[in-house]
Amino acid sequence: MAGKMPREIAPGVFWIGDCLAQRHKGKIYHGYNAAYLIAGETASCLVETGHPKDFPVIERHMGELFARGVPPLKYLFVTHQETPHCGGLGRVLKTFPDTLLCGDVSDYHLAFPQYEHRMRWMREGDEIDLGGRSLMAVEPVIRDLRTTWWAFETRERVLFPGDGFAYSHYHEDGHCGLLAEEATSLDLPDVSSTFADLALFWTKFADMNAYCDRLDLLIERHGVKTIAPTHGLPITDVKATVPKVQAGLKAAALMPESGTNEKIRLAGAGAAPTAA
Ligand SMILES: [Zn+2]
Ligand SMILES: [Zn+2]
C-alpha cells in the first residue's frame, strides 16, 4: 500500500509511488510505475517520474523525504520516453527550478522548449555526482526504446533497470510495498512472463538466452546488490531472485503473443472495428 512508502530499499535510496491495478485473464494484477529518490551528501536525484495518477502521491513522498533532511533535488534521470517513466518531467522541472534532466534527452525539448537549457545528455559510463555516491548510465540490456538507458548507483550498488525486471504482484496476498523476496507467494516466472507478453513484444522475436547472459554480465561487472525496477518489486537478493525473472523472460519468448489488454474485434466483413 502507499502507506508503506517511501520505503528505504538501500541506505539513502527510497522507493516512492503507488500500485496500479490491471485486469488480465480474469484476475486483478497490481503493478508499479515507481520512482526512486537517491539521497547523496550534497544533492538528490529522482529516477523516473511515476504514472500521472501517482503525481500527487510522489510529490507528497518527496516532500516527506525533504522534510526529513534529504538534500535538495538537483537531478532527474528518466530511463526512457514513455509516460509511466517520464510523463511528469515537465512538472518536476517546474516545481524544482534547480533540477537538471539527465539521460538520453532526445526530443524532450520539443515538448518543453522552455527547459531545453536544463537537459543534459548522458552516455554509457557518464556519472552524476551526488556527494559520496554517484549515478552512472549503464547498458540498458532489456530496452523498450532506442533511447533507453539504465542507471547504476555506485556506493550501495543499486541498479535502476526501467522496464527490466518488470512484473506484477498480487494485491490479495498483501504484496503491495514488499520486496520481491518478501512476497513469498508471488510466482515470479509467471508474472514476469505475463508482463513480457503484454508490454515487451520484441521478446517474442529475440533469443532471450543471449539477453539473460548479458544481464548476468552487467550484474557481475558492477557487483549489483539491489535492483530497483520501475514496474516490479525491488530485488535485494540478486543471486536468488534474478534467475526466476530470467526464467519468465525465456518462457514468454517461447509462447505466441497474446496481444494487449484492449482487444479489437471485427463485427463483420466491411464493418468498422469496435472496442470490445
Ligand atoms: Zn515501462
Ligand atoms: Zn499493489
Image (cartoon, rainbow, N blue to C red):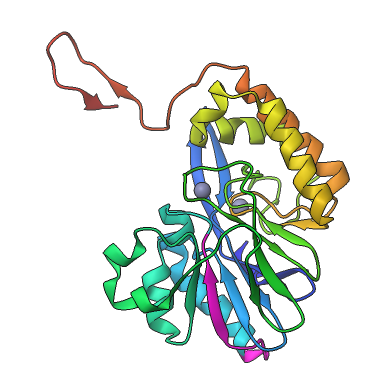
Q: Can you say whether 103 is above or below 6 in the image?
A: above
Residue 57: image location, x then y, percent: 50, 71
Indicate the quadrant where residue 34 lies: bottom right
Mark yes or no: residue 181 visible: no
Q: Which region shows up in magenta?
A: 67-78
- The percent position of residue 67, horizontal first and vertical second, equals 62, 90
In reply to whether residue 73 is colored magenta, the answer given is yes
Relative to 80, residue 243 above or below: above
**Residue 239 shown in magenta:** no
Pick whichever, 122 or 199, lies toward us.
122
- Which residue does the image show at 38% across and 74% down from the upper left? 91
Q: In the rendered view, would you say 132 is above or below 113?
A: below
Residue 125 visible = yes
What residue is drawn where x is 75% and y is 76%?
A: 133
Query: As rendered, which of 80 and 184 lies closer to the eye?
Result: 80
Quadrant housing residue 212: top right
Which quarter of the rendering shows the C terminus?
top left
